[in-house]
Image (cartoon, rainbow, N blue to C red):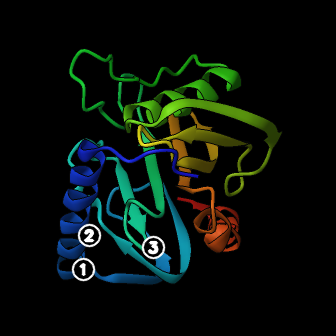
Amino acid sequence: MIKHVTWAGLRAFAFATVILLAACALTSVKTGAYTPSNSSYEVTLSGGWSDISQLMRARSPRVKLLSIDGPLLNRLYLAYALRPGDYMLRPDNRETPTPLYRADMADTELVEFIADNVSALGYLRPETSNLRPQNFGAGPGVRFDITARTSEGLDISGTALVSRQGETLNAMLYLAPSEHYYAAHLADVENIFTSARLR
């Protein structure tokens, strides 16, 4: 629930709306097998996901960003074969350190790495819960849930799946407002997570 709205929040919303309109003109809907170039896995998409990666400059070249309703309402990040020293997302604030992947991270540190990337997106106080094993393709992975909040007070829910393949990291991260939008596409996201095939 939104507690208050500031002028800065309204300006940010207006800017995001402009980005969303640009996205409609610059992206295409993806369905079926989705395999970006140089990727380490593929997923099967349905439900009209659009690749809006080119509109989000703070992401690593090894990260794709998909959305159905626009980045304010749902985001699905697909990180492919991050190598030691790679970043997933860079913070807007240059004084905030960029989370970097290390090959020696324990499972709990991988979860913290994803939470730090949620912070890098500008979300406040991300918390992780319900850590559980789940395969990523044919390999073992760690699944967990995330909660956070926007600076305007909007509650955000998320879920993620991470897996190491040798020294590299594959990850999928879904984020959406807790009210309506998270649940609206969660079943589709579950299907995408389970459709992953390592290459």
Badge 2 crowding class, 10 Å Cα cut-off, few under 14, some 14 to 19, many 20 or more, is: some
* Residue beneath the point at 45% across and 37% down: 123
| Frontmost residue, 105 versus 8 | 8
Residue 113 got which mark? none
Q: CA distance from mark 2 to mark 3?
A: 22 Å
Please tell me whether residue 102 is drawn above or below residue 138 in the rendered image. above
Residue 110 pos. (x, y %): 60, 28
Kind of element beneath mark 1: helix
Q: Amino acid at mark 3?
A: Tyr
| Frontmost residue, 3 versus 40 | 3
Q: Amino acid at mark 2?
A: Leu
Query: Dot 3 corresponds to which residue?
Result: 34
Q: CA distance from mark 3 to mark 1?
A: 19 Å
Residue 116 pos. (x, y %): 49, 27
Residue 20 got which mark? 2
Q: CA distance from mark 1 to mark 2?
A: 6 Å
Q: Is residue 11 visible?
A: yes
Residue 65 falls in which quadrant of the image? bottom left
Residue 24 got which mark? 1
* Residue beneath the point at 70% across and 64% down: 194
Q: Is residue 132 left or right of residue 177?
A: right
Q: How many marks?
A: 3
